[in-house]
């Protein structure tokens, strides 16, 4: 049985302000919560149906706080349109940030939660270990972002970055900017270590970051669309540069 | 000044049932409505602010019904979180469907409006002239799809298709299925005419369509994500197969 205070607390985690205060965020659904457990991420609290608990109890640490909920209670705390058996509150601090070792993405103000989630999934697919968020990026612990990463959030190192750190990164790695007027991506030689820079959905990459890029690249166009969705462009560029 | 009946009618066009009855759908915002006009698409009715009308009146056909609205009225009829000066109701029948001439996409039950919009934009970017929708695809005239195509809806031929027509297409063109266990896309030779098949976000391509495919292809994976977002995968495959 869930308390009113618990409902209020979980619902408050939709807002970045409350996530920062509490140091935690929400992960939902059987598949993603099992990934948390497999990856030994420290869970603050689990809310699950009796059926889920019966099946998975032995996988949980004995010290993990656990509240059994009925479907209507799960609906009250869930951010999904179709809640799925279990919801976990997780500490930010349980996700490690390791130093850069391979390729990375640098995002300048990606604002759509679906795009941010898809981009983190792309990084995980192509073995890109780090994602840096610059400017007004949507918070990666926003419930919509968390769900759309499909678990990749747990495997990619993600953090916010300021302009001086971007300058430092650019002195060590090749920064490749995705723009509409760059070199044809087909003509770019593959590189050992690179940081692909993706700009805001409508404004692209800001000038101060473009100035730090070693080169700018463009996906060849054969038709008439003015641009591609930011996540789609990220996927195409990662494939072209890394495969 | 807008009437109550007009507000009710426009709002009803969020539902496929009412769009079918009325034979029309909604396009919003300065940029997209100007594309309608440039492409000589027949507009059923325009609702616009005084400022927009003052600037663009000469571009409109004299026979196009036009209602001046104030911002608060535009907010009542708009499907956008930030309404933008103008909203047009457009007849389906004003969009032509031309017979297949080049590459095409075949979508099996793409359900997310954002994915559908991004995929239509990808088709337009890569010069793919036709998109066929099979199974339970989200309706392309859904307001969220229309807006996320960013105008590409007007330049790509899109229609629903049944299984017997898919069989007929497969007898004329090479059907290439996007699956998780196909041949590495890097090893596929580029082809003159092909129809790329993209499956549902969670279930992939159904067996009866897979059986009609000439070959199945996969994007090489270097990391750990289980899959890529359907629109992202479409973009990568179109680039790999067509550029």
Image: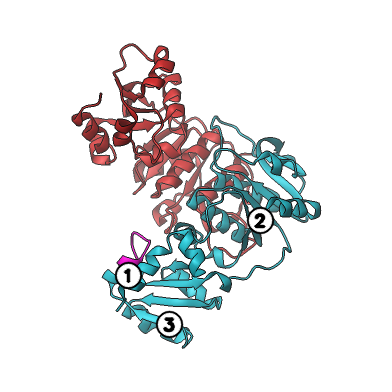
Chain colours: A red, B cyan
SS label for mark 1 = helix
Q: Which residue is labeled 2 in the image? A: B161
Labels 3 and 1 share a subunit = yes
Q: Is residue B140 magenta?
A: no
The x, y position of residue B107, in whole percent, is 62, 50
Q: Is there a contact, CB below 8 Å, between mark 2 and mark 1?
A: no
Dot 1: chain letter: B
User: Which residue is rendered at x = 55% and y = 38% of the image?
Assistant: B202
Disc number lying in front (3 or 1): 3
Rendered location of residue B132, percent (x, y)? 64, 56
**Residue density around tag 3, few if under 14, some if 14–19, many if 20 or more, within 10 Å:** few
Q: Which SS class for mark 2?
A: loop
Q: Which mark is first along the chain, 1 or 3?
A: 3
The part of the chain drawn in magenta is B76-83
Q: Earlier in the sequence, mark 3 or mark 2?
A: 3
Q: Nearer the viewer, mark 2 or mark 1?
A: 2
- Find the distance from the CA under tag 3 to the CA under tag 1: 16 Å
Q: Position of residue A55 (x, y in %)?
A: 44, 17
Relative side of B243 to B154, left or right: right
Residue under mark 2: which chain is it in?
B
Q: Which residue is mark 1?
A: B74
Quarter of the N terminus of chain B within the rendering: bottom left
């Amino acid at each position: 049985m869930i308390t009113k205070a618990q409902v209020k607390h979980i619902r408050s985690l939709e807002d970045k302000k409350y996530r920062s205060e509490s140091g935690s965020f929400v992960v939902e659904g059987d598949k993603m919560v099992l990934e948390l457990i497999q990856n030994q991420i420290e869970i603050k609290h689990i809310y699950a149906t009796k059926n889920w608990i019966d099946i998975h109890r032995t996988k949980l640490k004995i010290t993990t706080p656990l509240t059994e909920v009925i479907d209507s209670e799960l609906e009250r705390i869930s951010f999904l349109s179709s809640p799925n058996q279990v919801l976990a509150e997780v500490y930010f601090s349980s996700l490690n940030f390791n130093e850069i070792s391979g390729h990375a993405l640098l995002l300048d103000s990606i604002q759509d939660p679906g795009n941010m989630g898809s981009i983190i999934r792309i990084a995980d697919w192509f073995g890109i270990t780090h994602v840096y968020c610059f400017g007004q990026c949507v918070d990666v612990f926003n419930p919509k972002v968390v769900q759309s990463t499909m678990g990749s959030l747990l495997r990619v190192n993600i953090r916010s970055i300021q302009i001086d750190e971007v300058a430092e990164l650019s002195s060590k790695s090749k920064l490749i900017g995705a723009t509409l007027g760059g070199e044809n991506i087909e003509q770019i030689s593959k590189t050992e270590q690179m940081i692909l820079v993706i700009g805001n959905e409508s404004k692209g990459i800001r000038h101060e970051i473009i100035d730090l890029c070693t080169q700018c690249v463009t996906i060849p166009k054969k038709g008439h669309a003015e641009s591609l969705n930011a996540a789609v462009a990220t996927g195409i560029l990662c494939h072209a540069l890394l495969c």
